[in-house]
Amino acid sequence: MTEPTRGLPEVSQLVVGVLGGTGDQGRGLAYRLAKAGQQVVIGSRTAERAEAAAAGIGLGVRGAENAAAARESDIVIVAVPWDGHAATLSALRGELAGKLVVDCVNPLGFDKQGAYAIRPEEGSAAQQAAALLPESRVTAAFHHLSAVLLQDPAIERIDTDVMVLGDDRQATDTVQALAERIPGMRGIFAGRLRNAHQVESLVANLISVNRRYKAHAGLRITDV
Amino acid sequence: MTEPTRGLPEVSQLVVGVLGGTGDQGRGLAYRLAKAGQQVVIGSRTAERAEAAAAGIGLGVRGAENAAAARESDIVIVAVPWDGHAATLSALRGELAGKLVVDCVNPLGFDKQGAYAIRPEEGSAAQQAAALLPESRVTAAFHHLSAVLLQDPAIERIDTDVMVLGDDRQATDTVQALAERIPGMRGIFAGRLRNAHQVESLVANLISVNRRYKAHAGLRITDV
C-alpha cells in the first residue's frame, strides 16, 4: 500500500469551469466541487441556461457562456455530449490555450442491447481534445462517476476512485488533487492519453452492471 | 446493494482446463482454482511442459497437450499469449465444441512508454474467440488479476472483482460462480462480448498504475 495522494499540489484556490455543466454529469461535478469549497463556473451554449443551472446548485456557483467560463477558469472540465465534443472544443481553442483541460466525455452509442463503445478517429475523446487544443494541457478523468450519486444531496461521501490520464505529470497531479477534494474519492494516475479509450468506454460496462444489479456502479482500484 | 452471487449455479464438480496454463496468468489461475477444490487440467503445446507445470502446482492438477486438456474439461480458460490466440483456438475448434470457453487474453503491445491496447479485427480477443469457435459458448473474464498475487502461496485471499462478459446468461452465471470459488473474488456480470475490448485493454492502465504506485492493482466495482 502506498499513499497516492502524497505530494499532490494544493488546488483549493483554482477556479474550475465545467463546460456542459447543464447536463447531469457536469451539474453533478459542479455541485460536488462547489460543496468541497472550490470556485466553480458552469459553462453552456447560452449564458441563461448556465446561470439557471448555477442558481439551481447554489454554493456560489456561477454560470456563463462557454467561452467566458473557459476564460475565467484555471481548470476546465469538458462534460459536453460526445456529439458536440469536437465542435465545442474547436470553437474554444483560443480561450482554452494555457488551461488545464479535463476531458470526461464517454463516446458511447446505444441500441436495443444497451450501450457500446464508439472509437473516435483520434483514438479517444481525450486524444481528440488534445489534437484540437494544441496549446492546452489535456488530461482525462471523472469518467466512471454516477451522475445520480453526484447530484444526490443526501449523499455526503462517494467512495470511488477517479482514474486520471495524461502525458504531463504536473497536469495529472493537479487533476488527482482536484478529485480528492470530493469526500470519498481518490485520484489515481492510470496512464497516458493513448490509453484513454478503454477508460472512457468502460462506462458501457458499468451501464450493464447497473442494469443487472440495479446499482450505481463505480470503481475502486485495489492494492493502491 | 444487491447480492450478486445469489442464484449462481453449483460448479464445484466441473473440470476446468487452462490453455496456456504454463504462463504466469494461466498457472496462477490453475493454482487458485485447484486450491479452491476445483479439478484442473493445464494445457500446453506439449504434454511434457503441461505436466511439468502441473507438477509444480500439485493439488491434483494434471497436465496434458492442449487438445486433450480441452476434451477433458467442462470449462476451458484461454490464457495463451495474444500472439498465439487465433492459431491455438482455430486448431481446437473441434475439441472446444460444446464447451464453455472463458477468454482472459489481453491484446496489448509494449514500447518505451509502456503498454498500449491492440484492437483485434473482430473487436476483442473474446470476439475473435467467438468467431473462431461457433460451436462453443464463449465468455470473457479474469483479465484484471495480478499473476504475481495469483501465484503467491502466502496470499490466502485476493480481494478483487472479476468482470464477466458474454451473451449467454447461463454461461456468464457459471463463470461468475467459478470466479467466486476463489476466496475474496466476486464474479460480476459486466456486459456483452461486444463490450469486451475495453475490459481486455484496461490492463494497459493497470500496468501504469502498478508502475506509478508499485502495486499489484486490481478492480472492485462499487455499489454492487
Image (cartoon, coloured by chain):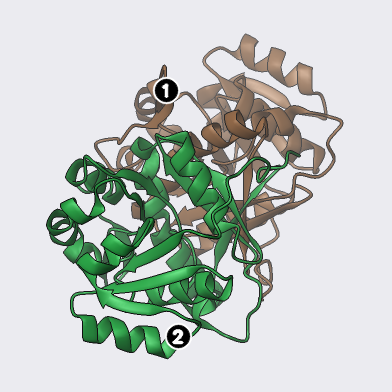
Chain colours: A green, B brown
Residue B208's spot in the image, x, y percent? Answer: 52, 33
Q: Which residue is mark 1?
A: B113
Residue A57, label in figure: 2
Residue A121's spot in the image, x, y percent? Answer: 17, 44
Question: Nearest the camera: A64 or B19?
Answer: A64
Report the quarter where the C terminus of chain A lies. Answer: top right
In the image, is B223 to the left or to the right of B138? right
Residue B125, label in figure: none
Choose mark 2 or mark 1, whichever is in front. 2
Residue that extends furthest to the top in the rendered view of this protein: B48
Report the quarter where the N terminus of chain A lies. Answer: top right
Residue drawn where x is 35% and y is 61% of the image: A73
Task: Say what secondary structure mark 1 lies in.
Answer: loop
Which corner quadrant of the image does residue B36 belong to?
A: top right
Which residue type carries mark 2? Ile
Q: Are marks 2 and 1 in contact (CB under 8 Å)?
A: no
Vertical placement of residue A56 versus A157, above or below: below
Residue drawn where x is 65% and y is 68% of the image: B4
